[in-house]
Image (cartoon, helix red, strand yellow):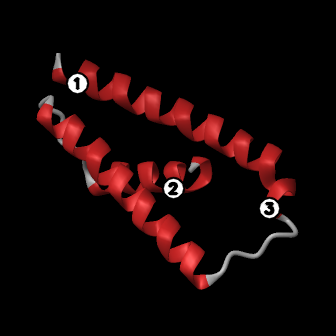
Amino acid sequence: MQETDLHTRLEELGRKIEETSARIKRENHLMRDHHLTGIELKDRYRLLQKRLNEEVANEEAHGHHVESLEKSIREWMRSATG
């Protein structure tokens, strides 16, 4: 049962990676001429880190342990989608 749950979560993560990669390619032209300042980057990092922490806490509150690799992938997806 637990193996099936892990398999389902990995499939969902794979689907999200594919969606995020496609979105990055589609929206890349929007950021081409805009250069973020250091303050904008720090603010964005803080926001993304807060969202990631909330997402991980929610998963773990429901009994799903989130490994480092999954956290990294979620962080990457959040950085691409805002």
Q: Amino acid at mark 2?
A: Trp
Mark 3 crowdedness (10 Å alpha carbons): few <14, some 14-19, many ≥20: few
Rendered position, 39 above or below 72: below
Residue position for label 2? 76
Is tag 1's residue or tag 2's residue first in the polypeptide sequence?
A: 1
Q: Residue at position x 13%, y 35% from top?
A: 61
Residue position for label 1? 3
Residue position for label 3? 31
Where, quadrant-wise, is the N terminus in this rendering? top left
Q: Amino acid at mark 3?
A: Met
Q: CA distance from mark 1 to mark 2?
A: 25 Å
Q: Residue at position x 31%, y 42% from top?
A: 55
Label 2 SS? helix
Mark 2 crowdedness (10 Å alpha carbons): few <14, some 14-19, many ≥20: some
- Circle number at residue 68: none
Label 1 SS? helix
Label 3 vs label 1, nearer the camera: 3
Q: Residue at position x 37%, y 50% from top?
A: 51
